[in-house]
Amino acid sequence: MQPTATIGARARSGDRQAWKRARRKASVQAFLLALPLLVFLLATFIAPIASLLARSVQNPEVRGSMPQLTVTLRAWDGNGVPGEPAFAALAQGLRQSAEAGELGSIARRMNFYQPEFRSLLMKTARETRSQTPAAWKPALIEMDPRWGETGTWQLLKRAATSPTPDYLLNAIDAQVSPDGSVIPVPADSAIYRAAFVRTVQISGTVTLLCLLFGYPVAYLLATLPPKHGNRLMLFVIVPFWTSLLVRTTAWYVLLQPGGVINTALMRFGFIHHPVPLIFNRTGVLIGMTHILLPYMILAIYSVMKGVSPVYVRAAQSLGAHPVTAFTRVYIPQTLPGVGAGCFLVFVLALGYYITPALLGGAGDEMISQLIASQTNEQLNWGLAGALSSYLVIFTAVFYFVFNRLVGIDRLRFG
């Protein structure tokens, strides 16, 4: 007969194996249940974002429409003017791209490097249709002397290179010169770095305002009797049921020079002329603070509900002043909610678009408005992808900063 200890060890080993099989089966079942949601998120959220970010380094226009010219320029060392094969490939590529309807996208891409390049390509494409010279190099230089300049061909060679850092550089107001060095863009064209700084400033100000207004409201909701607290909570939740565009439009009506606020202030004699409350930074801050305030209130409230009032009463019973007990005992216990609320509001404010577009002025453009302008008006998806990439990077950096300060990933709500 086998010893009792051996039998017990085998039984325990069998139990562990059965438990592992059960855990593995449960994990597979949970994964299969979540698989449709994961596929949906991948197809409708992650893949489009990844595609947009990938456009920030893609350069397909010249490379895809003029493959022969791309191969020729790849072998060119960038010094002087290329030989006859490059000119012949350019003429052939212009003809083919014009017939395929792709010349417009090439011209728009080249205009990104040099504003007058579009007219140069269009003019050359028109004149090459009716010509078949023995040598294209002197013919093209005679059409336009710019084809005899090294800088023109250096820009073409750069446009035929993919992947490229050009969009990423332009998104921080830098560019690549014809000789390949990185230089700043002209001062009158530098708008993106200022837009990033302005976006962070507006987001930080809105976060601070939401904290100042939201903390007392959350404290009131957390300390009131449940019956009254639940009724007041409706006023915090109801705005979520209203369209963001409707709420922003309401502020548009309230803040305009002849709106409700200015009319009331003048009627009661507080002011004699309308105060500029719209199409400036004031209107942006008011609208964004109103819309994002519920997020701050709910984040702080969820933590305050778990804070026992016993600690404050104990501090007061030991002789602490009510203000001291509140600031040194109660507030530290609510800091996780404050950190979560600040992070949530700040990240949401970074990507805001509708409210700054309707209530802000020319000097209040946030980075999201510039991204929308590049995609909808300029049709420059590469630059829009570069701006989006930096916005994603900034969001990740701020997440790690907030997480380092307050430990967001360790917060517990409710």
Image (spheres, rainbow, N blue to C red):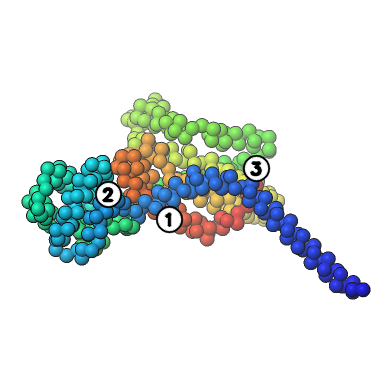
Q: How many marks?
A: 3
Callout in the foreground (1, 2): 2
Residue 161 % position (x, y): 29, 58
On the image, numbered disc 2 is attached to which residue? 65
Q: Nearer the viewer, residue 144 or 265?
A: 144
Residue 96 % position (x, y): 23, 46
| Dot 1: element | helix
Q: Nearer the viewer, residue 379 or 257?
A: 379
The kind of residue tagged 1 is Ile
The kind of residue tagged 3 is Thr
Toward the top, the furthest residue is: 267
Residue 106 % position (x, y): 25, 47
Q: Earlier in the sequence, mark 3 or mark 1?
A: 3
Task: Locate residue 393: give its quadrant.
Answer: bottom left
Q: Residues within 10 Å of mark 1 (few under 14, many from 20)?
A: few
In the rendered structure, the answer to whether residue 143 lies left or right of residue 158 reads: left
Q: Residues within 10 Å of mark 3 (few under 14, many from 20)?
A: some
Q: Earlier in the sequence, mark 1 or mark 2?
A: 2
Q: Which mark is residue 393?
A: 1
Q: How far is mark 2 from mark 3, CA to CA?
A: 67 Å
| Dot 2: element | helix
Q: Is residue 175 in view? A: no
Q: Earlier in the sequence, mark 2 or mark 3?
A: 2
The kind of residue tagged 2 is Ser
